[in-house]
Image (cartoon, grey):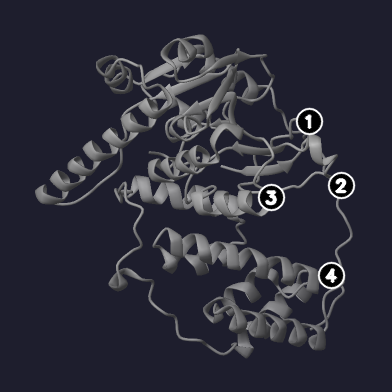
Amino acid sequence: MKPLMPFRIFNKAKALPQVEDGHWYSITAAAEGDADSKVIEVYVYGEIGAWGITANQFIQDLKAIDDGSSPIVVAFNTNGGDLFEGLAIHNALSRLGERCTGRVDALAASAGSVAVCGAHRVVMASNAMLMIHNPYTWVGGDAEDLRRVADVLDQAFEAMIAAYKAKAPNIDDAELRRLVNDESWLTASEAVALGLADEVGNGVKVQACLGQGAAMARYRNTPQALLDQLKASKDGVTEPVDPEPKSEPAPPAPNASDSAALALMITQACSKAGISNLVEPLIASTKLADEATVQAALTRAKSVRDLCVAARLPEMTAEFVQAGLDATAVRARLFDKLVGGGKGFEIDNSLPPADDLPEKVQAKAPNPSSIWAARRQATQSRPGQGA
């Protein structure tokens, strides 16, 4: 199943949190009120799985807040993600028992529908939807590989059926399997009738899919009204354009001693973080402008390295770092490369085998000529500055 984007935990949140499409994961704890009125609210808004919020992180964050007795409301607005991560969240909610309520604010699709059904009580907004469908994956390999993955998909299908029937034990088995196979988009009333939800709540105005219009369009039976809503939302956002941008005075070029100090900072920080192979790309991308620029680039580089390793494409890290890309842009490029290149995601939550670990990169000392070239480029780009 396809992954999606951020998740937030609020302790007695007094209002629905604002959705920020640019963030993949954030956590905020609101001030606690009286002990008797404490309610823990968890917001699963976006992708479930390695590209968003993992079940492990979800469970650890919830455990840090849970006092063992307070009611817990888990609000969903997601078009899915990794199936096994969704099953793990399903089981975590199920273990909370009667004090756990699942709330569908707009959409609980795919792995999100599996996860929310783990709650003891499920409340859907009157304008929300629950989408259930067959598990799927991308794969490449020989005939035996394809047969093995088909078997895994069959097992995953049965796991999904078991999760839905745990919530709706009286649902007709044949009808449930038909609905899953047909990719069914259920309204709140339909979900209640089937037993997959318990109550229809008040409608809330919230962007249904967090800007994931492209992902939603790939489903077979996405309601046209939902696609129209996403398109209208996208078309309605315009960026202000200044036809004659005003030129700003260029900042002063760093002197030789500053450049050397910043280069040393990059070298030491990269060595400590185990990314010494990124020293030269960082020097080139920051041009050793100032300490704030260097610190920000170092933070980005660590995130980019982690994403590339997770995607099993560590060799692309230096290219992304030198281009100055942030984590969001890197995720998009990695996703496009994995899908477009034919590399598939197996529905498997096991760790990679030892021989599939990323190759260790030999640490490399900084190149003085690169430092000098960066400083010279910075000074020559500003009129009146000498070498």
- Residue lying at 38% horizontally and 32% vertically, measured from the top left: 163
Identify the amino acid type marked 2: Lys
Q: Nearer the viewer, mark 1 or mark 4?
A: 1
Q: Nearer the viewer, mark 2 or mark 3?
A: 3
Secondary structure of the residue carrying numbered label 3: helix
Identify the amino acid type marked 3: Ile
Residue 32, compared with residue 174, is above or below; it is below
Identify the amino acid type marked 4: Pro
- Label whose residue precedes the other's in the sequence (2 or 1): 1
- Label whose residue precedes the other's in the sequence (2 or 4): 2
Image quarter of the C terminus: bottom right
Frontmost residue, 347 versus 301: 347
Residue under pointer 4: 383
Question: Where's residue 305, x and y in %?
Answer: 52, 66
Q: Is residue 211 visible?
A: no
Image quarter of the N terminus: top left
Secondary structure of the residue carrying numbered label 1: loop
Identify the amino acid type marked 1: Ala
Residue under pointer 2: 246
Residue under pointer 1: 15
- Label whose residue precedes the other's in the sequence (3 or 1): 1
**What is the CA distance from the residue labelled 3 to the residue labelled 1?**
18 Å
Question: Where's residue 353, x and y in %?
Answer: 29, 67
The crowd level at tag 2 (other Cα within 10 Å; few <14, some 14-19, many 20+) is few
Q: Nearer the viewer, mark 2 or mark 4?
A: 2
- Label whose residue precedes the other's in the sequence (4 or 3): 3
Secondary structure of the residue carrying numbered label 2: loop
- Label whose residue precedes the other's in the sequence (1 or 4): 1
Secondary structure of the residue carrying numbered label 4: loop
Frontmost residue, 358 versus 174: 174
> In terms of image quadrants, where is residue 272?
bottom right
Question: Where's residue 20, x and y in %?
Answer: 69, 39
